[in-house]
Image: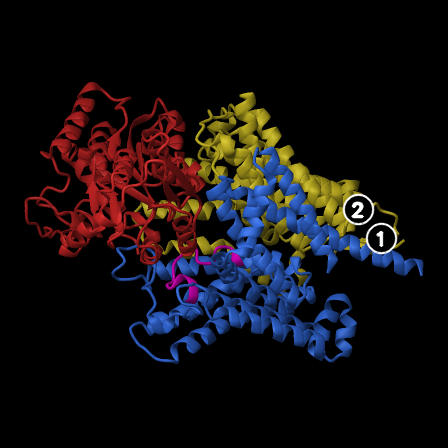
Chain colours: A red, B yellow, C blue
C-alpha cells in the first residue's frame, strides 16, 4: 500500500541519488546473493508461490552470477531476526514480501546500510529500502466485465480475505467492470479473514453459490473456491497464479501476479551498481499483472475482455475513471479525471451499488 | 426454498471430517486415554492420503492410505503411553508437532497438483424427499461411511461385550485389571482405532473437502474434534449434534456475510468453544461431575508386578 | 540429569539419519543447527531473546504439571497478557513516564492470571477437566485479539491492516546491549527461575505442590487441600504466561498484531517436559529449543533444509525424552521392588 504523497516526496528522490553510489557493482567472480522472506509456505500456490517463481526467474536470468535464498513461513510478528539473518549472511538484495514486514525491514535496513531492501506492498521507504506493489485492481476490472457478461443469475460471489485497501479496491474495480456491461448486476461478498484457509475458502464459495451466485471470484490464495465452483458446474476465476488445472472447464481466466520482470530488473540494477530506492506501483502496462488465457466464454465476451486489457495497457481505460460515486451517494474527490494512486492505495469505501458495509 | 438443501449439504461436508476424527477420539477417551495428537494424525493422513492417491491414481486407495498413516502414528503414541507409561498430555502434543513436520515432508512434492472429485452417490427414491432428501442422499461416499461409523461405534460401545470391557477399562483401570481384563491391550486397540479415524478425516480433507494438498490445511480441525468429544460428554449422538452444530455455525457466518448482514465474525467463531464450556457447566450443574468423561481419563496405567 | 542428554543424543542421531537420507551432510547440519547458534554472539543473543518468553511460561507450567494439573492453555494466557499489557501501552500512546512499563507488566500478569482462573475454577467448583477448557480458551483469546486489532484498537493510520499503533518508547523494553535486540525481559526470566528454585526446594508450598501430584493426601497434611492447590498453581502459571506475553509484545514486537503468540505457549509445554519439570531444567531446555529454532532458520538459508524438518525433530526429541524418563522411572521402581 503506497501513497502518492510519499512517492512524490523530494526526500525519496534525493536519497535515491545517494543510494546509487552505495550499491557498488558486484565483483565479477563473486556471486550476488539475493534473499527472500515469505509469509506463507512456498507451496501455497498463491502469493508466496508466485514470489518464489520470481526468485527462480532471477536464477535463470543470471546463470552463474547470482545465488538466491529464501526463508518461508516467517511470521510477521517475529520477522526481524529472519530478515537480519539474510542481511548478515552476505545477501546484498533482500525482498520482504508481505505488508507486515514493513517495520522490521526498516529496522534491519538501518543496521545494514550496505544491503538493499525491497519491501512489497509497503509505503515507508529509506535510502536502502524500496517499495513495490502491483495494480491488481486492473485485472479485477477485466474479470468484472467478463463476469457481468457471463452471469445468468445476475449475482456474482466474491470470496474476500481481509478488508484492506488492496482488497477493497479490487472489489470496487470488479463491480465497476461488471456494472459497465450489466447495470443490474449484484455482488455478494463473504470474508474468510485469512489469506489462506482452503477449507473455509471453499465453504465461502459454496455459501455464495447457495445464495444464487453462478460465478465465483476470489481474493484469497488457494484454488479451493475455483474447485468448488467447478464441482457445481459454475464459472470462476483463478487468483495469483494460473489455476487452470483446478477447473479447466470452469475457469474463465486468471489474474496472474508476475513478479519476474520486476525481480530481474532490480537484480540487474544491483549487478550493474545502479540500484536506487524507489517506489513502483504498476500493473498491466508493465507486465506485473498478467491475464491468463480467456477460455470457456463466447467470442464476443472474449473480445470485450481483450479490448479492455489492451485499453488498460495503453492507458485509454482506467477502472477508476471519474465520477466515482461512493456508497453514500457522494462523488469522490477527483483531479485528473481519474482517482490517483494514493486514493486507490488507501481505499476504504465501497462504490455505490455494492451492498453491505466494509467490515471492521 | 432451493437454498436449504444446498446449505445443509455444505454443512454436512464441513462437519464430516470433524465427526470422523471426533468419533475416533471418543472411543480412545472411553477407554480412558487422552490423545492430544489428533491434529498431527489428521494432517499426516491428509498428506499421505493425497500423495498415495496421486501416485496410485486412486482416491479410494488414498483414503485408505491416509487412514493407515494416521493409525501408524497413533501406534507410536500407543506404544509410548501404554507400554512406557509416558505422560499422555506431553506425548499427544509431541505427536502433533511431529505430525505437522512429517506431513510437510511427505507432501513436499505434491503441492499444487489437482485431483478429480470422487463421484457423489445419489440414493434413488430417498433423494426425492423434500429438502432433507437432496441434502442427505446425494453426498459423497465418506459422508455415508461416517454415518455408518457413528452407528457402529454407538452400537459397539453400548451393546457389545468388547464395548463394555472398553468402558470398564476407561472407568477404572485398577479394578478392571483386578477382574483380569487386558487393560493395556484394549487401550492399545482403542488408540489404533482413533488413529485410523483421524487419518481418514485428514484424507477426507485433502481428497474430498478441498481436493489438493497444502501444508497446514487441517487448520486446527483436530483440536475442534477434541472439543467435540468434550461437548459430547460420553454420548455418540451428541457428537453428531455437536459436529453439525460446529459446521453449521461456520457456514451460517459466511451466509450472513453474503447476505450483507453485519455480525462480529470473531464472536461467531468463538461460539463453538464458549458453547462447549457452557454445555459442560450445564452438565455439571445437573449433577454429573466430570462432564461425563471416563473415570481414569488421562492417567497412566502401570500394572502391579 | 543424564536422561534428557541421552534423549537429545538419540534424537540427534535419528535426525542426522534423516538429513543424510535427504542427501545432505549430517555433520554440516549439526554445525548449522547446534554449534553455530551457540558460538556466534549475534545468534546467541537471538537465542536468549527467544528463550526469554519460553522460560517464563515454562516456569509457570512447572507448578501446574508437578501438581498434575494439566494447563495446556498457556498460549491463551500469554495472549491475554499481551492484550492487557499492550492495552495499557495503547491507552498511554504518546505519553511518556517511568510508570508506563511497570503498569504494562502488572496488567499483563494480571490478565494472564485472570484468564487462567477460569479453567481452575471450572475444575474446582464444577469438576470440569481443565485440559480441554484451558485449550479452548486459547482459541477464544486468539479471536479476542483478532477482534481488538481489527476493531477498536486498529491503528487509524494503518490502512485497515489488522494491527495496533506502534508503541511509544516509554512502552518498549529497551535492549540490554547497544545494537542488539536482547531486552530486560531476560532478567525477569532469570528471576523466575531462581524464585521457582527456592520455592520448590525450601518452602512448604513447593512441597505441597509436588506432593499433590504424586500423593494428594500428603498435600492435605501440609495444610493445602486439592482445590487450593489447583487454583494457586493455575494463578501462578497464568500470571507468568501473561508476563511473558507482555514482555514479548513490548520487547520484541512493539505493537499488537494477530499471531504474536507464535505458538510459544505450546512450545513452552515441550520446554517444561524437556527440563524434567525442574526450574533449572526449564531454563536450560528453553535454550535448547531456542537454539533449534534459530538453527532451523540458518539451515533454511545455508542448507536449504525445510522448516518442517525442525518441527519433526522437535516432536521426536520430546518423544525421546519421555521414553527416557519412563525408562528411568521403571528402573528405579524395579530396583525398589527387588530390594
Viewer can see residue A245: yes
- Report helix, strand or loop for mark 1: loop
Helix, strand or loop at label 2? It is helix
- In whole angstroms, how far apart are the C-alphas of marks 1 and 2? 9 Å
Q: Is residue C251 left or right of residue C334?
A: left
Q: Is residue A48 left or right of residue A329?
A: right
Give the side of residue B129 with respect to residue B165, left or right.
left
Q: Residue at x 69, y 52 (%)?
A: C321
Looking at the image, residue B56 lies above or below residue C289:
above
Residue C99 in the figure: left or right of residue C243: left
- Chain under numbered label 1: B
- Give residue A47's position: percent from left, percent from top: 35, 40
Q: Are marks 1 and 2 in contact (CB under 8 Å)?
A: yes
**Residue shown at 38% from the left, 77% from the top:** C100
> Few, some or many C-alpha atoms within 10 Å of disc 1 (few <14, some 14-19, many ≥20)?
few
- Which residue is under mark 2? B184
Segment colored magenta: C251-264
A96 is within the stretch colored magenta: no
The quarter of the image holding the C terminus of chain C is: bottom right
> Mark 1 vs mark 2: which is more N-terminal?
2
Residue C149 percent across, percent down from the top left: 36, 60
Question: Picture coordinates of residue A182 (x, y %)?
Answer: 17, 33
Residue B282 is situated, as x and y percent measured from the top left of the image, at 58, 62
B261 is higher (above) or lower (below) than C280? above
Seen from the viewer's position, the closer of residues C246 and B131 is C246
Q: Residues within 10 Å of mark 2 (few under 14, many from 20)?
A: many
Q: Which mark is residue B303?
A: 1
Amino acid at each position: 500500500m503506497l501513497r502518492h504523497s510519499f512517492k512524490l516526496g523530494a526526500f525519496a528522490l534525493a536519497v535515491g541519488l545517494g543510494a546509487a553510489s552505495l550499491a557498488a557493482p558486484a565483483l565479477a567472480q563473486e556471486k550476488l546473493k539475493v534473499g527472500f522472506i515469505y509469509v506463507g509456505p512456498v507451496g501455497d500456490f498463491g502469493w508466496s508461490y508466485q514470489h518464489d517463481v520470481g526468485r527462480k526467474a532471477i536464477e535463470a536470468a543470471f546463470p552463474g552470477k547470482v545465488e538466491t535464498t529464501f526463508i518461508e513461513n516467517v511470521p510477521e510478528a517475529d520477522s526481524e531476526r529472519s530478515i537480519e539473518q539474510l542481511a548478515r549472511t552476505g545477501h546484498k538484495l533482500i525482498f520482504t514480501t508481505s505488508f507486515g514486514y514493513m517495520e522490521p525491514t526498516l529496522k534491519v535496513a538501518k543496521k545494514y546500510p550496505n544491503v538493499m531492501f525491497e519491501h512489497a506492498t509497503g509505503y515507508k521507504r529509506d535510502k536502502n529500502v524500496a517499495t513495490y506493489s502491483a495494480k491488481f485492481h486492473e485485472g479485477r476490472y477485466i474479470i468484472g466485465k467478463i463476469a457481468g457478461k457471463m452471469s445468468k443469475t445476475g449475482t456474482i460471489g466474491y470470496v474476500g480475505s481481509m478488508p484492506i485497501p488492496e482488497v477493497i479496491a479490487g472489489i470496487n474495480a470488479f463491480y465497476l467492470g461488471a456494472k459497465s456491461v450489466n447495470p443490474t448486476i449484484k455482488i455478494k461478498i463473504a470474508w474468510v479473514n485469512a489469506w489462506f484457509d482452503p477449507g473455509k475458502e471453499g465453504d465461502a464459495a459454496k455459501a455464495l453459490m447457495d445464495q444464487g451466485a453462478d460465478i465465483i471470484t476470489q481474493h484469497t490464495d488457494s484454488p479451493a473456491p475455483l474447485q468448488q465452483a467447478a464441482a457445481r458446474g459454475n464459472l470462476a476465476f483463478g487468483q495469483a497464479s494460473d489455476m487452470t488445472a483446478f477447473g479447466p472447464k470452469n475457469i474463465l481466466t486468471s489474474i496472474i501476479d508476475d513478479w519476474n520482470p520486476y525481480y530481474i530488473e532490480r537484480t540487474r540494477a544491483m549487478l550493474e551498481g545502479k540500484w536506487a530506492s524507489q517506489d513502483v506501483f504498476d500493473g498491466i502496462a508493465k507486465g506485473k499483472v498478467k491475464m491468463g488465457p480467456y477460455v470457456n466464454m463466447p467470442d464476443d465476451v472474449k473480445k470485450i475482455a481483450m479490448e479492455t486489457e489492451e485499453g488498460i495497457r495503453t492507458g485509454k481505460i482506467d477502472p477508476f475513471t471519474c465520477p466515482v460515486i461512493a456508497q453514500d451517494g457522494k462523488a469522490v474527490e477527483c483531479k485528473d479525471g481519474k482517482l490517483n494512486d494514493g486514493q486507490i492505495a488507501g481505499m476504504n469505501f465501497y462504490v455505490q451499488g455494492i451492498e453491505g458495509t466494509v467490515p471492521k | 426454498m432451493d437454498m436449504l438443501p444446498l446449505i445443509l449439504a455444505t454443512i454436512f461436508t464441513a462437519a464430516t471430517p470433524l465427526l470422523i476424527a471426533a468419533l475416533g477420539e471418543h472411543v480412545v477417551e472411553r477407554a480412558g486415554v487422552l490423545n492430544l495428537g489428533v491434529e498431527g494424525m489428521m494432517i499426516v493422513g491428509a498428506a499421505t492420503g493425497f500423495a498415495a492417491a496421486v501416485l496410485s491414481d486412486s482416491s479410494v486407495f488414498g483414503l485408505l492410505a491416509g487412514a493407515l498413516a494416521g493409525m501408524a502414528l497413533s501406534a507410536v503414541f500407543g506404544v509410548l503411553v501404554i507400554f512406557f507409561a509416558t505422560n499422555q498430555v506431553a506425548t499427544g502434543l509431541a505427536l502433533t508437532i511431529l505430525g505437522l513436520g512429517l506431513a510437510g515432508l511427505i507432501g513436499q512434492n505434491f503441492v499444487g497438483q489437482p485431483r478429480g472429485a470422487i463421484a457423489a452417490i445419489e440414493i434413488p427414491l430417498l433423494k426425492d424427499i423434500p429438502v432433507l432428501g437432496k441434502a442427505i442422499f446425494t453426498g459423497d461416499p465418506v459422508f455415508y461411511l461416517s454415518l455408518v461409523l457413528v452407528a457402529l461405534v454407538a452400537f459397539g460401545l453400548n451393546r457389545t461385550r468388547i464395548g463394555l470391557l472398553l468402558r470398564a477399562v476407561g472407568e477404572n483401570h485398577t479394578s478392571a485389571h483386578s477382574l483380569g481384563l487386558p487393560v493395556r491391550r484394549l487401550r492399545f486397540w482403542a488408540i489404533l482405532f482413533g488413529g485410523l479415524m483421524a487419518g481418514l478425516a485428514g484424507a477426507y480433507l485433502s481428497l474430498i473437502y478441498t481436493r489438493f494438498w497444502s501444508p497446514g490445511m487441517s487448520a486446527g480441525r483436530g483440536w475442534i474434534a477434541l472439543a467435540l468429544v468434550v461437548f459430547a460428554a460420553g454420548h455418540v449422538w451428541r457428537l453428531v449434534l455437536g459436529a453439525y452444530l460446529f459446521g453449521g455455525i461456520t457456514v451460517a457466518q459466511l451466509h450472513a456475510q453474503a447476505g450483507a448482514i453485519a455480525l462480529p465474525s470473531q464472536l461467531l467463531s468463538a461460539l463453538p468453544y464458549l458453547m462447549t464450556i457452557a454445555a459442560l457447566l450445564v452438565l455439571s450443574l445437573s449433577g454429573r461431575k466430570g462432564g461425563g468423561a471416563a473415570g481414569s481419563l488421562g492417567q497412566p496405567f502401570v500394572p502391579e508386578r | 540429569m543424564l536422561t534428557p542428554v541421552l534423549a537429545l543424543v538419540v534424537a540427534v542421531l535419528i535426525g542426522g539419519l534423516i538429513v543424510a537420507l535427504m542427501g545432505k551432510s549430517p555433520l554440516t547440519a549439526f554445525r548449522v543447527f547446534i554449534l553455530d547458534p551457540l558460538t556466534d554472539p549475534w545468534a546467541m543473543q537471538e537465542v536468549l531473546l527467544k528463550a526469554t518468553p519460553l522460560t517464563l511460561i515454562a516456569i509457570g507450567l512447572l507448578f501446574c504439571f508437578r501438581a498434575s494439573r494439566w494447563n495446556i492453555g498457556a498460549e491463551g494466557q500469554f495472549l491475554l497478557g499481551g492484550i492487557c499489557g499492550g492495552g495499557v501501552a495503547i491507552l498511554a500512546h504518546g505519553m511518556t513516564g517511568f510508570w508506563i512499563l511497570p503498569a504494562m507488566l502488572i496488567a499483563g500478569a494480571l490478565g494472564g492470571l485472570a484468564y487462567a482462573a477460569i479453567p481452575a475454577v471450572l475444575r474446582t467448583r464444577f469438576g470440569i477437566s481443565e485440559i480441554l477448557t484451558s485449550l479452548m480458551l486459547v482459541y477464544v483469546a486468539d479471536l479476542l485479539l483478532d477482534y481488538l486489532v481489527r476493531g477498536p484498537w486498529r491503528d487509524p493510520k494503518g490502512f485497515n491492516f489488522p494491527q495496533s499503533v506502534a508503541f511509544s518508547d516509554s512502552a518498549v523494553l529497551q535492549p540490554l546491549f547497544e545494537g542488539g535486540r536482547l531486552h530486560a525481559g531476560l532478567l525477569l526470566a532469570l528471576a523466575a527461575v531462581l524464585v521457582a528454585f527456592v520455592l520448590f526446594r525450601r518452602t512448604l508450598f513447593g512441597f505441597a505442590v509436588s506432593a499433590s501430584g504424586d500423593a494428594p493426601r500428603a498435600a492435605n497434611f501440609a495444610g493445602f487441600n486439592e482445590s487450593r492447590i489447583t487454583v494457586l498453581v493455575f494463578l501462578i502459571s497464568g500470571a507468568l504466561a501473561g508476563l511473558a506475553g507482555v514482555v514479548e509484545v513490548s520487547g520484541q514486537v512493539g505493537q499488537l498484531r494477530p499471531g504474536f503468540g507464535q505458538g510459544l505457549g505450546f512450545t513452552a509445554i515441550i520446554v517444561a517436559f524437556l527440563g524434567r519439570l525442574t526450574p533449572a531444567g526449564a531454563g536450560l531446555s528453553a535454550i535448547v529449543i531456542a537454539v533449534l529454532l534459530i538453527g532451523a532458520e540458518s539451515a533454511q538459508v545455508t542448507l536449504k533444509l525445510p522448516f518442517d524438518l525442525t518441527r519433526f525433530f522437535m516432536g521426536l526429541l520430546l518423544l525421546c525424552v519421555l521414553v527416557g524418563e519412563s525408562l528411568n522411572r521403571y528402573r528405579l521402581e524395579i530396583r525398589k521392588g527387588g530390594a
